[in-house]
Image (spheres, helix red, strand yellow):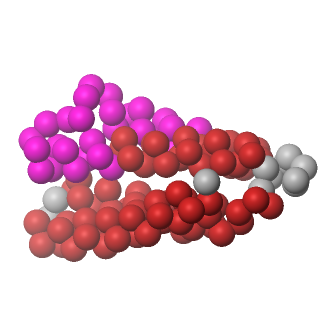
Amino acid sequence: MHRMFIVAAGIAGAAGIVTAAGAAHAEASNLSASSTMFLAHAPAFLALGLTGASRPRAMDYAGIVLLIGVALFCGDLLARQYLGGRLFPFAAPAGGFLMIAGWIALGVTGLLPRR
């Protein structure tokens, strides 16, 4: 599981830089918002990956919820920018809700005992 989060961190970081560059050249608010979300979450995914087996299993689940949220939110914004339409109705709000839920769940896992 920790490798998946490290890969996600690398992808999110790279996608954040690419979308930031695109936003700077195209003045596209969807790219700017997407870049912010990618770059804000890349360090969190890296931290999840680097903590490895020392973290509670619940933290894995919280990280997966966060990852799905980022993918939905940013994926919908990128689809709007480049495909001219949404991934599906309410994809971005669902992704935003999952990001909020993932962060809350990560916070709650701080109260759980370590393995």
Residue 105 position by quadrant: top right
The residue that appears at 27% across and 26% down in the rendered structure is 89
Viewed as shown, does residue 79 lie left or right of 16?
left
Q: Which residues are magenta?
A: 74-101
The residue that appears at 25% across and 65% down in the rendered structure is 19
Residue 37 seen in the figure: yes
80 relative to 18, above or below: above
Q: Position of residue 74 (x, y in %)?
A: 33, 49
Q: Position of residue 49 (x, y in %)?
A: 62, 64
Q: Position of residue 8 (x, y in %)?
A: 46, 60
Taking the magenta stretch, the answer to whether it contains residue 114 is: no
The residue that appears at 41% across and 57% down in the rendered structure is 37
Residue 54 position by quadrant: bottom right
Dominant secondary structure (helix, strand or loop) of the stretch shown in magenta: helix
20 relative to 88, above or below: below
Question: Which one is nearer the viewer's eye here, 81 or 54?
Answer: 54
